[in-house]
Amino acid sequence: KLIDLLQSQYDKINDVHTSTDDSELLKKLGIKYGPNPLQQDNLMVTSKHTGKATLIDPTGNILEEYDLSIGNNAFNFVGFDSGVYHLLIKIGGNSITLAVIKG
């Protein structure tokens, strides 16, 4: 019985994570980004809308907060350690978190 309960809880969590299609949301928000993983120390994000972006380090600390403008936006990773960073983008009532890998 405990196994069935744990499996049902896992299925609910898994459904939440797989129900959102990030590529569709990126298309809706007009966001393109790269390179990922970073080949140098800059991430380019192109947006069709203005918004806010928050860069979060691998431990969950907020490193920088930016205004996202229409067109190209550069995010500099110089001096940051290797790891997986998150860029939280908010446009209107929508938000998406991009995982960015710095080698």
Image: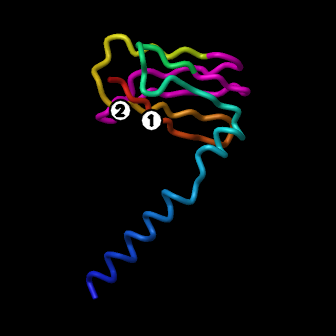
Q: Position of residue 64 (x, y in %)?
A: 44, 21
Q: Which residue position holds label 2? A: 84
The kind of secondary structure element at disc 2 is strand
Taking the spot 72% from the left edge, 41% from the top edge, the residue there is 28
Q: Position of residue 65 (x, y in %)?
A: 49, 22
Q: Is residue 3 left or right of residue 43?
A: left
Q: Quadrant of residue 91?
A: top right
- Which part of the image, by quadrant, shows the C terminus? top left
Q: Quadrant of residue 31?
A: top right
> Magenta span: helix, strand or loop, mainly?
strand
Location of residue 20 with respect to 66 vertically, above or below: below
Q: Amino acid at mark 1?
A: Ala
Q: Which residue position holds label 1? A: 99
Mark 2, Cα crowd under 10 Å, few <14 / some 14-19 / many 20+, is some
Gap in angstroms between the C-alphas marked 1 and 2: 6 Å
Q: Amino acid at mark 2?
A: Val
Which contiguous range is marked in magenta? 45-72
Magenta-drawn stretch contains 79: no
Total residue callouts: 2
Location of residue 31 with respect to 15 vertically, above or below: above
Taking the spot 39% from the left edge, 29% from the top edge, the residue there is 101
In this view, the residue farthest toward the front is 39
Q: Is residue 32 left or right of residue 34?
A: right
Taking the spot 55% from the left edge, 14% from the top edge, the residue there is 74
Q: Is residue 82 left or right of residue 52?
A: left
Q: Position of residue 17 (x, y in %)?
A: 48, 57
Location of residue 3 with respect to 40 vertically, above or below: below
Q: Which mark is residue 63?
A: none
In this view, the residue farthest toward the bottom is 1
